[in-house]
Amino acid sequence: MAQVTVSVNNRAYTIACDDGEEDHLLDLARYVDAQTQGLVKGLGQIGEARLLLMSALLIADQLAEADERIADLTAQLDGAAKPDAATAPGSANAAELSRMLENATKRIEALAARLEQT
């Protein structure tokens, strides 16, 4: 079993991983660190636990949106064999995507506002 030292918010963590997964783990850590650094720029150093929690929530929100989008695209592909009004060009798909993005923005803004109040 391999060990990798990653850095998030300028703090080093040693993490075990399967052999051959080191580069993937480093990429994931860089992504988490980028999310955390974005929060630091917007909110300042609000405590390591809160920063990591906020980063985790942002990443979970991105994952949930991606899962929704995958489900939508899968449904569209399943319906492609028999087109109807729901899958026709110019349908509500653009409006649905816009609604999803707006909802995610509102959730992120609400989380940031709550952190600023504490």
Image: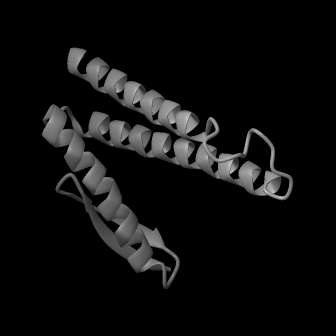
| Residue at the limit of the structure toward the right, as seen here | 82
- Please tell me in which quadrant of the rendered image residue 91 appears: top right
Residue 71, x across and y down, in percent? 69, 48
Residue at 45% in and 36% down: 101
Judged left or right of residue 35, residue 46 is left
For the C terminus, which image quadrant? top left
The colour mode here is: one colour
* Residue that sits furthest to the top in the current view: 117
Q: Nearer the viewer, residue 29 or 64?
A: 64
Above or below residue 88? Residue 1 is below
Q: How many marks?
A: 0
Residue at 41% in and 70% down: 25
Q: Residue 28 in the image: state x and y as whole percent.
A: 39, 64
Query: Residue at 26% across / 47% down in the picture?
Result: 36
- Residue 84 percent location from the top left of the image: 81, 43
Q: Is residue 89 left or right of residue 22?
A: right
Front one among 90 and 68: 90
The correct choice, above or below, for 17 with respect to 67 in the image is: below
The spot of residue 69 in percent (x, y) is 60, 47
Q: Would residue 111 be found to the left or right of residue 48 on screen?
A: right
71 or 86, which lies in front?
86
The correct choice, above or below, for 41 with respect to 24 in the image is above
Vertical relation: 104 (above or below) 110: below
The residue located at (30%, 33%) in the rendering is 50
In which image quadrant can residue 5 be found? bottom left
Question: Looking at this view, is 67 or 118 the one in front?
Answer: 67
